[in-house]
Each structure stands twice: as C-alpha cells, then as structure tokens.
Amino acid sequence: MIDPKILRESPDTVRDAIRKKSNDCDLDAVLALDTEWRAALAQVEKLRAAQKAANNDMAKLPKGSPEFKDKVAEMKAVSAQVKDLDAKLKETEEKWGRAMLTVPNIPHSSVPVGRTPEENVVDFTNGDVAAVSPCAKPHWEIPGFDKIIDFNRGSKVTGAGFPFYVGDGAKLVRSLIQLFLTEGAANGYTEVMPPIFVNAASATAVGQIPDKEGMMYKTVEDSFYAVPTAETPLTNFFRDEIVEEEQLPIYRCAYTPCFRREAGSYGKDVRGLNRLHQFDKVELLKWVHPTQSYVELDKLRDDAERILVKLGLPYRRLLMCTGDLGFSQAKKYDLEVWAGGQKRWLEVSSCSNFESFQARRAQIRFRNKETGKPELVHTINGSGLAVPRVLAALLENNLEADGRVRIPECLQPWFGKSHLSFA
C-alpha cells in the first residue's frame, strides 16, 4: 500500500504512476473515499471531545441538581450520536481500505518508461548463445524426454501443467533445488521451510490480493490459498511485528512448490516446461533498512546471477519498464536464460524492490535506534531460482550427439554422475 500522505499531498504523482503502469485504478474514487473517511473521523473525534468535556463538567456538579440532570441528558444525546457515527466511520473506513488496495506502487525514478515488454531494457548479457550444443533442440522433442518428465500421466492424474518427474528427471530437479539452497546459505540467507497454504490476510499483505487473486488456487472450506511463490509466506513471517534496527538486513531463503492457475496461457511459448501450474522454486527474500534498499536489491540480483554462471547458462538481465512492472513493485529486474533448442530467452528469476509497499500492508517495522519510534522496513525478493525453465535450458543447451545431456559440474555432487541418459 502506498503512503496515504503521498496520495493526499501529491495525487498527480500517484496518477502518473497509474498511467505509467497501465493500471485501471479509479484514483478519483479513492480520493473521494479518503476525503469522506477523514471527514467522518474528524466528526467522531469532535463529538468524543465534547463527550469528554461534558463528563468532566458532570464530575464538578452536585448529583441530582438540575445542572447535573441537564448534563446527563446532553451526554446521552452525544453518546447516541457517537454510536451512530462510529458505525458510519467503520463502514467508510472499510471502503477506504479496499479502495487503497487498488492503488499500485509508484515506480522508482530509475525505471524506464514504457508500455510493452519490448520496451524493457537489456541491462547486461553474460555468455555466448552461439556456444551452446550444436545438437540443441526443444526439450519436448528430445527422444526419451517423456520418460523422465511425463506430462500425459500428470494430465491424467491432475490436469495439464502438472507433470510427473521420473527417475533422473526427479533427481535432477532435486539436485537443482539443493544447489539453489546451498548457494543461498553461502550468501547469508537463512533457510526456512514455510507453509504452502496461506490465508487471505497474508496474500493481501504481499499484493497478491486483489491484484492476482484469479491466478491463485483456493480451498473451498477454509479459503486458504496455495502459494504462487514462497514470497507470500516468507514476507508474512514478520507481519504485525517490530524488529530492532540492529537486526537489519534480514536474509531468508525457502524452497516450495508453487501453484499458479495461469488462466489464458496458450501457444508455443507455454509448451513443455515453459509454463506449468505446479513448479518448484527457491525464493530469496530480504527485510532491509530503507536507506540500503537499492544496494540490497543489486546484491540479491547478483546472488541469483552467480547461480546461472555456475550452471554455465547464457543469460541476460532486463530492467523492466513501467508498463511491464508488477502492481506492487517499485523496480524489477528479470533474469532470462538462453534455451538453445527453442532459440529464445526464458525468464527464470524476477528480482524486485517493493520499498515500503508490502511492509505497510503487513505492518512490518523496525525500531529506529535514534528516535525509538517504529518505521516501515523495505522488502526485496527474487527467485534464486525457478526450476522448470532452468531445467529446460540445461536439457537443450547440453544435449550431446549421442542423445545424452551433460550435467554441469556444480550439480554432479547431488546428481551423482556427469550425464543424464534417456535410455
């Protein structure tokens, strides 16, 4: 949630952010509700002050005197007004709160202005795309692919986008997860195993609700949401808490399966492992001091990039433009790997700074050691990394003439051998 002070004092700044993000927020309606809520609050506070003054006057009067009885009558009338206005205030405040949830975060000044993904900026490229295997082909066309990743049986058991990983396929996924967690620990992230279902308050705190509610799977009886990313439970770890300033920055990482409905996804770009409804991912997350926010974003992004270097995958870093920036994000980098068989870039990580947007919703604060007052932290997260597209690129780029796939040296301690065979 953005700072209400910015909404009131600089509405044009917010309006400009909505335009740049191509968001459909009705800011005029939000501003009207804000005015209505503040007017109702001022009225209630004025009546409460009158109620307190009348109560003080009563204490000075003899009980049973005409003046005392007049004050009692006055108190009853004021109390009835306060009760009625309190109900109105509560209703208005709830409407205001829902409206505020529709206002997107304001892009950082360093974010390029643009409306489409084509206007994202290629910030850095690493590796030679021409150096991948000359035998590379789309992973779903590799002979024997369906023996290690079985989409047909997954579709039978659950539905499209829920594959079985079998034998070396399962082992390679587990090896990737182990590598990602090991790298996270080496970079100072404490591993957490979080719940994979969250309540509505947790989903709202990170900005999944209402912005992406339609993309999440939801249980009927308990109204729990299957996590679309470990960001959701991890961010909420400190919800409604105050940490000491000396604790910052706090680094955490977590592996979870992730669940996304991805409604409307179709075509060649979602074939095979390119887009799934259930997939595995390791998330990196930080709670940081506001003054160190963007330094910590760059460090987190570097942590994710180093894994791609170890895996030997050509990749590029995109600085996302305003139109391709998420609802909650102030700035975001995407990391994309080159898939030599498909001859296209596949996103494997988004590294984002939310500034105080999530922390304000979740009321995650630190105590300023100089003032003793609580202030909002900044939250930063990124995939470190998402498994399916990394796996797709490894299978395609490392495919050899004999039909085997070379396993990067950094994975071999967990995978146990230098090559994957489909035989």
Image: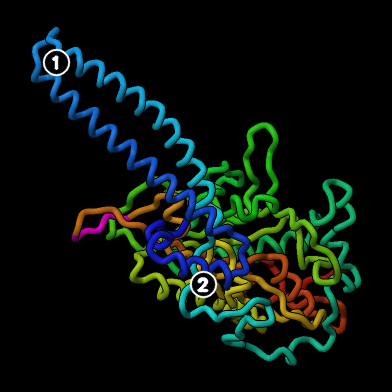
- Report if residue 244 is visible in the image: yes
- Which amino acid lies under the numbered mark 1 shown in the image of this protein? Glu
Q: Quadrant of residue 181?
A: bottom right
Q: In the image, which is nearer the foreground, mark 1 or mark 2?
A: 1
Location of residue 345 in the rendering, given as x and y in whole percent from the top left corner: 72, 79
Q: In this rendering, is residue 62 above or below 83?
A: above
Q: Name the residue under label 1.
A: 67
How far separated are the C-alphas under marks 1 and 2?
A: 64 Å
Location of residue 347 in the rendering, given as x and y in whole percent from the top left corner: 67, 73
Numbered mark located on residue 178 in the image:
none
Residue located 61% across and 76% down the image: 335
Location of residue 51 in the rendering, given as x and y in whole percent from the top left corner: 24, 28
Q: In this view, does 373 lie to the left or right of 389?
A: left
Disc 1, SS: helix
Image quarter of the C terminus: bottom right
Give 298 or 257, whichever is nearer the viewer. 298
Give 142 or 267, whichever is nearer the viewer. 267
Q: In this view, does 6 lie to the left or right of 49?
A: right
Q: Which of marks 1 and 2 is nearer the N terminus?
A: 1
Location of residue 171 in the rendering, given as x and y in whole percent from the top left corner: 72, 61
Q: Quadrant of residue 55?
A: top left
Q: Mark 2 points at which residue?
A: 331
Q: In this rendering, is residue 54 above or below 267?
A: above
Residue 5 falls within the magenta-colored stretch: no
- Which amino acid lies under the numbered mark 2 shown in the image of this protein? Lys
